[in-house]
Structure formats: structure tokens, C-alpha cells
Image (tube, rainbow, N blue to C red):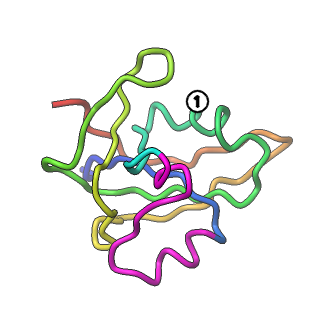
């Protein structure tokens, strides 16, 4: 059985720089908001459509994160989204997969389930 993971969507060029550090502070949006935006597997399609529509170099990072820095907070449509209030440890990243764009629509690969709010 696969480990439940949360997911971070990132542009590949940004990840090429971020992967060089042990702890990543996140994207410009993450830095602006004071936390790293994450999604559950079920939230990925909506997040892609809302924030990354048409981008062809998107990667999904599967992260194994638990602890006091993880908060589930209301966001889009009142849904609870996972937010990580600390730099993202590179060691927490369990998978990295491209999200291909086909006819303008992101094709989310098969991914392990996500945990829900505690």
C-alpha cells in the first residue's frame, strides 16, 4: 500500500533550482502568503485549472509531511487545503512526476491517496 501523500505543483524550471537546497521556502506565491500551498490528490485538477492553466512544464511533487507545521485551512470553494508553514524539506519529497499537457488539458498521472484533515 502506498504512503498517503500531499502534493505540490511547481514549474519545472523553478524546481530545477529548488532541488539544490535541503529546505525549500517555496514559490513566489508561497513566499507572499507565508506558507507552502499544497493539495490533496483530489484537489489537483482544480488547482491546475485555477492556477496553472496552459502551462506545459508542470511537475507534481508528492510530499510526506505531518506535524505542527501542517494546517488545513479553508480556501477555494470553502474546501480545506493543506498548508505547510515551514520550508519544505527535500527529504519529504517521495515522488516527482511531470504533468503532461494534452490539447490544453493537464493529464494528472496516477498518484497515491492523500491524508485528510486530522
Query: Residue lying farthest right?
Result: 103
Q: Position of residue 115 (x, y in %)?
A: 26, 38
Q: Position of residue 41 (x, y in %)?
A: 43, 38
Residue shown at 45% from the left, 44% from the top: 33
Residue at left 40%, top 81%?
21
User: Quick one: which residue is furthest to the top in this view?
Assistant: 78
Q: Secondary structure at mark 1?
A: helix
- Spot the residue most to the bottom: 20
- The image quadrant of residue 62 is bottom left
Q: Does the stretch in magenta take in 92? A: no
Q: Quadrant of the C terminus?
A: top left
Q: Is residue 50 above or below residue 9?
A: above
Please rate how many residues cluster around mark 1, counting C-alpha atoms within 10 Å: few if below 14, some from 14 to 19, many from 20.
few
- Does residue 17 lie above or below 63 as drawn? below
Q: Quadrant of residue 86?
A: bottom left
Whether the magenta-drawn stretch holds residue 28 is answered as yes
- Where does the magenta region start and end? 14-32
Q: Which residue is mark 1?
A: 46
Vertical arrangement, residue 66 with respect to residue 21, above or below: above
In the displayed structure, 34 sits above or below 51; it is below
Q: So how many labels did they put on this image?
A: 1
Which of 55/100 is in front? 55
Q: Residue at x 49, y 74 (%)?
A: 18
Location of residue 51 (image quadrant)? top right
Residue 43 location, x and y as percent? 48, 32
List x then y, in percent, for residue 70: 23, 45
Amino acid at each position: 500500500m502506498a504512503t498517503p501523500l500531499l502534493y505540490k505543483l511547481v514549474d519545472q524550471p523553478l524546481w530545477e533550482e529548488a532541488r539544490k537546497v535541503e529546505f525549500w521556502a517555496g514559490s513566489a506565491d508561497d513566499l507572499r502568503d507565508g506558507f507552502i500551498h499544497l493539495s490533496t490528490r483530489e484537489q489537483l485538477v482544480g488547482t491546475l485549472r485555477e492556477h496553472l492553466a496552459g502551462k506545459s512544464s508542470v511537475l507534481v511533487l508528492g510530499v510526506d509531511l505531518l506535524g505542527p507545521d501542517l494546517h488545513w485551512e479553508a480556501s477555494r470553494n470553502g474546501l480545506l487545503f493543506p498548508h505547510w508553514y515551514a520550508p519544505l524539506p527535500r527529504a519529504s519529497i517521495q515522488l516527482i512526476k511531470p504533468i503532461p499537457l494534452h490539447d490544453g488539458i493537464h493529464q494528472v498521472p496516477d498518484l497515491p491517496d492523500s491524508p485528510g484533515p486530522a
